[in-house]
Amino acid sequence: MLAPAALLDLVARFRAQLPDYKRGQYNETQLRRDFLDPLFRLLGWDVDNRAGYAESFREVVHEDAVKVGGATKAPDYSFRLGGRRLFFLEAKKPSVCIKEDVAPAYQLRRYAWSAGLQLSILSDFEEFAVYDGSVKPGAKDKPAKARVFYCTFEDYAAKWDEIAALFAKDAVLKGGLERFVKKLHEQLAAARTAHDKTLIQRQCEATDRQIDALVYELYGLTTAEIALVEGGAP
């Protein structure tokens, strides 16, 4: 799928003004209106509730309310279908380094974990990061912990298929989000199984070495005799 022309225009405009955006005076609200709202409109979401749905059925809730650690927090965007939350989008101004800063990732992951959401997004348009919300967040976690996708605005055109396959409204309706999460968890389970097998194998090998050492000591074998037993040269 070719990236839409409107996306290329957004990227070009962001690139042209990026030095100004990163100075810090360009705030999060401006970023949301100028870039994130249009980005998700391109993905098919009714960001402004132009359809006039009732509040309980609107597709995008701005400043949603989520209980986090006993306090009520407000994720910037909550994307829904049929009143069911699907994912959060937490926005940051471009002066924030999403790839390296700990606090934004922890904030988003707490929101997603508390709401029981599988995936959620952290973005300042310059960067676009997707996190697995099923991994319990820790305050000391590195920003890459539970991050399953990352790109910059310069990659949007090339990675548009990947982004749309996950977060376009039509793709979500066709089960794209669920399929990705299922595949992700299958990969994680396989990785854990492989790690467990390797760990067990290493533990067995270490135990075997300890037993061998005790036997050699019991029978008083010399270094040369041990080498013969183990198949090495004397």
Image: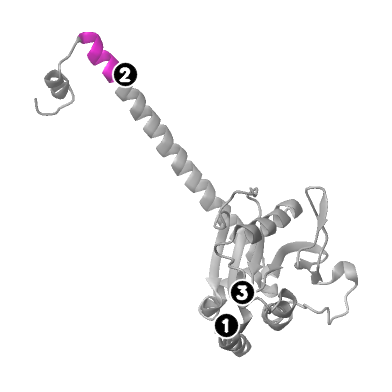
Tell me the CA gap for discs 3 and 2: 57 Å
Q: Residue at x 59, y 70 (%)?
A: 128
Question: Residue 119, percent across and down?
Answer: 65, 60
Q: Secondary structure at mark 3?
A: helix
User: Label 3 sits on what residue type?
Assistant: Ala
Q: Residue at x 65, y 61 (%)?
A: 104
Say whether residue 178 is visible.
no
Q: Earlier in the sequence, mark 3 or mark 2?
A: 3
Q: Nearer the viewer, residue 198 or 36?
A: 36
Q: Is residue 220 above or below residue 170?
A: above
User: Label 2 sits on what residue type?
Assistant: Ile
Q: Nearer the viewer, residue 192 or 133?
A: 133
Give the residue pinned by disc 2.
Answer: 211
Q: Do labels 2 and 1 touch, CB within 8 Å?
A: no
Question: Residue 214, percent across and down?
Answer: 29, 15
Q: Do labels 3 and 2 touch, CB within 8 Å?
A: no
Give the residue pinned by disc 1.
Answer: 19
Query: Is 36 inside the magenta-drawn segment?
Result: no
Q: Earlier in the sequence, mark 2 or mark 1?
A: 1
Q: Quadrant of the C terminus?
A: top left
Q: Is residue 229 above or below residue 191?
A: above
- The part of the chain drawn in magenta is 211-219
Q: Residue at x 68, y 59 (%)?
A: 108
Q: Earlier in the sequence, mark 1 or mark 3?
A: 1
Q: Residues within 10 Å of mark 2 (few under 14, many from 20)?
A: few
* Left or right position of 46 against 2: right
Q: Nearer the viewer, residue 228 or 124?
A: 124
Give the residue pinned by disc 3.
Answer: 164
Snapshot quadrant of residue 124: bottom right
Q: Quadrant of the N terminus?
A: bottom right
Instruction: Please tell me whether the stretch drawn in magenta is mainly helix, strand or loop.
Output: helix
Question: Residue 211, percent across and down?
Answer: 31, 18
